[in-house]
Image (cartoon, helix red, strand yellow):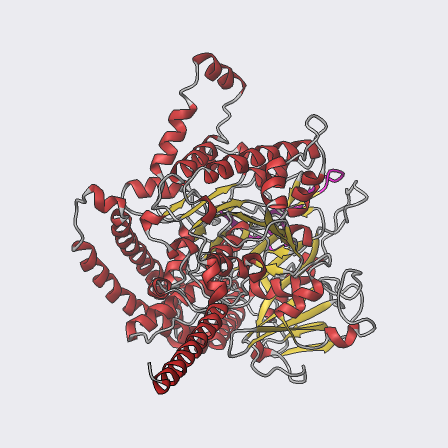
Amino acid sequence: MKRSQLGVRGRNQTQSLAGKRHLLLLAGIFLITLWPSLATAQTSRLVILKLDGLPPDTVDHFVRETDPRTGKSQLPWIDHIFYDGGTRLANFYTRGISLSGPSWSMLDTGQHLQIKGNVEFDRYTLYSYDYLNLLPLFLRGAAGKQADMPGVEVLDSLGIPLMVDAYTHEESYNGFSIYLRGPRYLTLSNALQNHFKRPPKELFDEWTMGLEMGNMVNDELIKELISELRNPKVRYLDVLLQTYDHVAHHNGDRDTQLMVLKELDTVVGRIWTAIRNTPDADQTALVMVSDHGMNTDEQVYSQGFNLVKLLGSPAGGGHHVGTKRRLLMEYSIKALNPFYGLITTTSRDSYYLKGQSLDYPTALIDFDGNERAAIQLRDSDLNLLHILLQQLQRRDITPSLRQALTDAFFVTVDHRQAHWQSDLDDLKEELTALHRSIEKQDALWQQQPKKLTQEEKDLGRDDEIKRIYAQLLRWRVEEQDYSGYARVMSNLLALRRETFDPFKLRIEDVIQKDSLGEQNSIYELQNYVVGIGPNGLVLDASGALDMQRSFVRVNYFSLLQGQIVRNNVQPRVSNRPVEFVATAIPLECLPPGLGDLDRVKDSVVWVYGGEEKQALIFAREDAAGQYSLRYQPIKHLQQDPEGRISLETAAWQPGLPLEIIEDPALSIPAGKADQWLSQWHTDLEWLHAVHKTWHSNGVIGLYEALGRHVLDQGRELSGDEMLMQRFVQRQRRLIETELLVLANNHWNFDVRGFNPGGNHGSFFRTSTHSTWMMAGGSKTGIPAGSVIEEPYDSLSFTPTMLALTGKLRHDMSFAPELTRRGFRAFPGRVAWATLR
């Protein structure tokens, strides 16, 4: 070979080698950039144990306690799998109210709260959303009228997918849960069959002592989950176990709780063993998560306070009170009816509606959650109009009083006319769009096949068809109910002084039955009309009705927060059952001079702990969706009849709602408490500062529970689509609580059967502190023996699970199938430390 040729060949080899090195370098950079998504993508199967109310501190205590019989941990499987071989998040919290319905909605979606209670009531129609009641799904599902739990239907209407929706029907096993897609008839059938297959003597002994059927469904769910693990197509499995929550409500003793946790430990061991025996064990992750904690103490009986009785009393307004759960339901046969709608507790002390409790309930209470209650009251002006009409229909009143009553009636209507009419016009526009949607849905339903092959059923096609029909039925009911409300409100607004004749009116034609009307303003809640005063109807010097002296009024903030009991015999329990009351108020009602309120969201949370101890919680959101919050101490907030609010700002001091500044666990710069607490901070900064305090993340949670979180649809909507979305948002507004009542420590409002063992629902750390543990095979990337101290909340769970499986990438972009299925950006952080 010639020398020149050797030189060329050498240069080419050098260039080739340099090029290869360059490519390797680029590839290395590419791999490093994508490493988190490539690593987490090795988790090909996700198994989630959802545990109702399981507190991590209780689990930790028993894991570290030695069983004297074995010399091992009291919970050996949990110790082995999650403590030695997995990762635990030591500071994981429910965001918002520590209540199952709201908490699981965030855990299952990764989105802000849309569902605010276990039960919600529509103010206009009194329709009850009962999110925990599973039986109607089975019974209506058998008739093809329902396919999913009510919470799923609500989230679907808002366009919010569940975590399980990241998988196809044949790829997922969704055990019984609050957010269940599709009734599991086979599970229930097999559970009953297996329970009664036992020897006759064993069944007879059980029958004589009382049927023990509580665990039969759980046992069947675990069997099914283990069986489904052998199916290579199934990539997602979850099951909800509620035993600990149910037991801890009634029993606060150590031995009972340990017994339940030992049963759970055995279940964890069975599932882990089954996973290890599958071909893809090294790519399977097992996750244990709870929706909230539990406020239980072996030395204290949780005290019960009856808010239903209070509201039904003369001091509370003499309300006929509607609830979804029957009072003392263990003693009521009617409580067995799963379809029973609103349950009204009649007040014998009603000021003006005696004998009309079934037609005109005037207060609604959701006391689920025990340490909190949500109260809605009928529009105070509707009470006033109702009373005035009753008096005007009397024939024994003087002409001067009749004239004064008529004037007062029309002054009240005129005062509300513009707002009521505007709302009514919007509702009618939405109902027109709803009617067109019903016609389209009916045509879609008619096109569906009436018979399906087994293969189509296996793909979930039967449930898809049920959803079409169920949506059609819901819309038809909604059209009827809201149209009825609109018709009666139109009749009220059509009344004219010149043609007004009260004797020709039926009150129910202008005052809607089974309706609370619009939300009350702060003024109305501070001056709520409940009846005619003790001196009767009084005229002032000008001959007009004296509106203050003629009516009994109630200030519900001072009434609720000021309750005191006399017979408290437990030194560790306060004689005040209510800690504070909270509500949302419109930003535009607040006076100027409250600091930097640029970009503040339109709802502000007012927290009332007494006239001198109050606070406002402001929230704002930046372009990236990052929440910031500010807590402003105030006192003496009042609203006048025209909607103007007056208040006094206050200094940071002990005793304010949430008891922040005096808490020794507060983590902020030393010596700068007032300065730091008075500033805007992101929700993450607040979480770092307060999560270990007694009220934990209550500043964040109060806004999460009472604020409005409207989700962008992410696409252009047609005219009718926009109106239907406005209609759905209206429905979410109509369930909002007016008075969120928080109990003092070891008090509860569960009037269906006060829980002596323990409760949840508050913002106490013991109630919001939740369990999150993960373990997996060698290819999942889940660290072994790791404890993460960084605080996280509910919004992090779904994005972390999707990142674990590679469906959410490190840059927070989605795998293509998630985008197609309607997933949108998550407001919460991924806990990347769990996925190394």
Q: Residue furthest top?
A: 201
Looking at this view, is 524 or 25 the one in front? 25
Q: Residue at x 58, y 36 (%)?
A: 265
Q: Does the magenta segment cover residue 696?
A: no
User: Do we see residue 100 in this rendering?
Assistant: yes
Q: Indicate the quadrant where residue 722 lies.
A: bottom left
- x and y percentages locating residue 263 in the rendered image: 57, 32
- In the rendered structure, the answer to whether residue 380 lies left or right of residue 420 reads right
Q: Is residue 358 above or below residue 649?
A: above
Q: Indicate the quadrant where residue 549 lies.
A: bottom right
- Quarter of the image with the C terminus in it: bottom right
Q: Indicate the quadrant where residue 686 lies.
A: bottom right
- x and y percentages locating residue 259 in the rendered image: 63, 31
Q: Is residue 196 above or below residue 223?
A: above
Q: Is residue 136 above or below residue 3?
A: above
Looking at this view, is 11 or 466 the one in front? 11
User: Do we see residue 490 in this rendering?
Assistant: no
Prevailing SS of the magenta stretch: loop
Looking at this view, is 817 or 425 the one in front? 817
Q: Is residue 712 above or below residue 442?
A: below
Q: Residue furthest front?
A: 2
- Quarter of the image with the N terminus in it: bottom left
Which region is colored magenta? 297-324
- x and y percentages locating residue 410 in the rendered image: 47, 74
- x and y percentages locating residue 789 in the rendered image: 67, 58
Q: Residue furthest right?
A: 671
Q: How many numbered marks does the figure carry? A: 0
Q: Residue at x 22, y 47 (%)?
A: 456
Q: Does the magenta segment cover residue 300?
A: yes
